[in-house]
Every structure is written in C-alpha cells, then in structure tokens.
C-alpha cells in the first residue's frame, strides 16, 4: 500500500511539474521594478507567478468581473510568467519607463478579458482565446498591419464583444470592419478605413537603426539601410527560448537570408551584436 501511495504521489508531482512548465500568460517588460497585475479566475483562488528570476510565488486572484491585485518586483529577464486558468488580465500600474512590450496569451484558452492600455504592445494574437469578449489596448504602438492581424485573430461572437484601440499608430487606417464583421463593437466609436496595411508589411519591423527583419516562406530576411559588417545573430522566442544563433554579414540594402523552417505562431525577437553596434528588432509569425 505504501508503495502504491508513493507511486501515485510521484506521478502527481510529475504531472504538476509538467503543467507548471508551460506558463499560461507571458508578459515582457522594458525593465525591472514593482508591478501590479489585476488577475481574475472563473472562481477566485491562487495562481503561480514568476517575476523574471525563475522562482514561482503564489498570488491570490479574484474573479473575471472582480479581479484582485497581485504585486511583485520584476527582475532578471523582465519576463513575467503566469500559471493558472486566467480569465481576466489587466496591467494597472506600469510606469512610463517600465511598460509591457509584448504579451503571449496563446496558452490561455479561458481568457475572457484582456486589458493592457497605455503600454508598448506592438502586436497581439488572440487566435487561441475562443472565450475572449473584451479587449482594451488603446494608447499602445500597434500599426495598421498589427491591428488588422489582431482583428483577424479575434473569434466570431454569438453575443456582445468590445475592443478599444484608439490612439494606436494605425487605429484610423486599420481595417476595423474585420472585427465588426465578427460581431465586435469598437470602444469610443473608432473606425479605420483599411488603407494602412500592405500585403507583406505585417511580418516586418524596423528598429531605430533601420534594421528590417521579415519572415517569409520559412526564411528570415535581415537588412539595414545604413549598417553593414559582421554580426552575431540571435533569435529568441517570447518565452526566452533561443531559436537560432549564427554569424552573418550585413551589406547595406541587401538581404541576409537565414533558413528557419516552420515556426509556431507568435512573436520573436532578433538581436544582432557586432564589434561596435548592437541592434534589435522583432517579427511576427501569423
């Protein structure tokens, strides 16, 4: 009997570790410091939070419509990982220099409300969130292509749903009809005319150094308008996994092509490190 009990306990621990190995929500922040998240579950209870140092701590969440604040200190990688069947997520006090720059909710199928206004999000994929009915991302950095991609990822509703996107770079030139056709209503009456996105722009991003990266047909294309030389290329997933590392040579206005194969849907970060220059950008796989 003792052997059986020990075995079942061991299996339970293995299953628990497996579940915790996959965070349900991942947030990337600009820098370290105190942060408060308002979290809700279908029924109030505990979740696990990694504030960036790999250590799991317990926080008590509220409900979908009555969230509870969980406060911690972002540190280490500045990547916050949340473990739990989260239904509501809201950033309540991200400072002006410590904003959320990316969010991965692809492993949060129970998510109903996503509220991250006044941050620095440039993209959001909700294709894995069939229960979502409320999205607020006003005052972020979405261009028209990124907003069109967001609308495309939204589920088709049978009831009411609201999305608020004003004061984003591409709000008025995004194709808001992509969302209204699925039953979504735009907060503050924002209407985009659909003129802002070209067919290929959705997978491209430029940095301050005019670094451009594009993912197309399983290849990454890297170029710069005014930077050339030898660089070490690093490609990382949103949760910090290294996808690729290799040495490349940049020639002004010519693409360096890096075969990557099929990548899962999500956001990826690109870093190029040279003798006297470090550059960063990102790309989205839809």
Image (cartoon, rainbow, N blue to C red):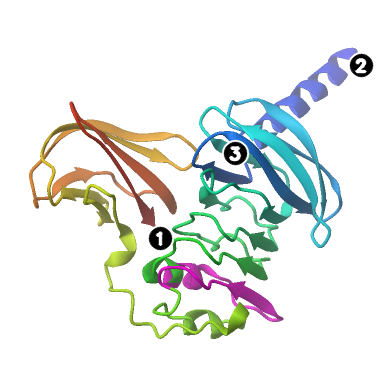
Closer-to-camera residue (56/21):
56
**SS class, disc 2:** loop
Magenta stretch encompasses residue 168:
yes
Closer-to-camera residue (147/220):
147
Question: Nearer the N terminus, badge 2 or badge 3?
Answer: 2
Of marks 2 and 3, the one in the foreground: 3
- Which of the 4 quarters of the picture holds residue 276? top left
Question: Nearer the N terminus, badge 1 or badge 3?
Answer: 3
Which residue occupies 75% across, 42% down? 70
What is the CA distance from the residue labelled 1 to the residue labelled 3? Answer: 23 Å
Which residue occupies 39% across, 79% down? 173
**SS class, disc 3:** strand
Q: Position of residue 258 (x, y in %)?
A: 20, 43
Report whether 204 appears left or right of 21. Answer: left
In the image, the segment drawn in magenta is: 148-170
Which residue occupies 9% across, 52% down? 253
Report whether 229 appears left or right of 128. Answer: left
Pointer 1: what residue? 286
What is the CA distance from the residue labelled 2 to the residue labelled 3? Answer: 42 Å
- Name the image quarter holding the C terminus: bottom left
Pointer 2: what residue? 1
Determine whether 82 is above or below 62 in the image. above
Magenta stretch encompasses residue 255:
no
Binning the other alpha carbons within 10 Å of mark 2 as few (below 14), some (14 to 19) or many (20 upward) gives few
Of marks 1 and 3, the one in the foreground: 3
Q: Any mark on residue 89, and which?
A: none
Which residue occupies 79% across, 59% down? 64
Q: Position of residue 81 (x, y in %)?
A: 61, 39
Q: Any mark on residue 80, and which?
A: 3
What is the CA distance from the residue labelled 2 to the residue labelled 1? Answer: 51 Å
């Amino acid at each position: 009997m003792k052997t059986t009990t020990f075995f079942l306990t061991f299996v339970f621990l293995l299953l628990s570790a497996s579940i915790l190995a996959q965070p349900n929500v991942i947030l990337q922040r600009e820098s370290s410091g105190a942060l408060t998240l308002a979290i809700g579950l279908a029924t109030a209870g505990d979740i696990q939070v990694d504030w960036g140092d790999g250590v799991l701590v317990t926080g008590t969440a509220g409900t979908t419509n009555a969230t509870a604040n969980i406060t911690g200190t972002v540190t280490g990688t500045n990547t916050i990982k949340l473990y739990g069947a989260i239904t509501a997520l809201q950033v309540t006090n991200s400072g002006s220099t410590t904003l959320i720059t990316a969010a991965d909710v692809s492993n949060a199928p129970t998510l109903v409300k996503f509220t991250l206004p006044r941050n620095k999000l440039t993209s959001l994929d909700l294709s894995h969130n069939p229960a979502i009915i409320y999205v607020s991302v006003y005052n972020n950095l979405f261009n028209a292509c990124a907003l069109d991609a967001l609308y495309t990822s939204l589920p088709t509703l049978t009831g009411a749903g609201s999305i608020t996107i004003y004061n984003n770079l591409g709000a008025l030139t995004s194709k808001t009809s992509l969302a209204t056709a699925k039953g979504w209503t735009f907060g503050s009456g924002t209407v985009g005319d659909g003129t802002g996105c070209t067919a290929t722009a959705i997978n491209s991003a430029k940095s301050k150094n005019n670094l451009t990266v594009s993912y197309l047909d399983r290849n990454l294309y890297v170029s710069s308008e005014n930077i050339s030389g030898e660089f070490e290329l690093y490609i990382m997933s949103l949760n910090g996994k290294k996808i690729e590392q290799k040495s490349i040579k940049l020639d002004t206005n010519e693409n360096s092509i890096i075969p990557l194969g099929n990548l899962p849907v999500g956001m990826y970060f690109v870093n190029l490190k040279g003798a006297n220059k470090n550059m960063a950008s990102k790309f989205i796989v839809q």
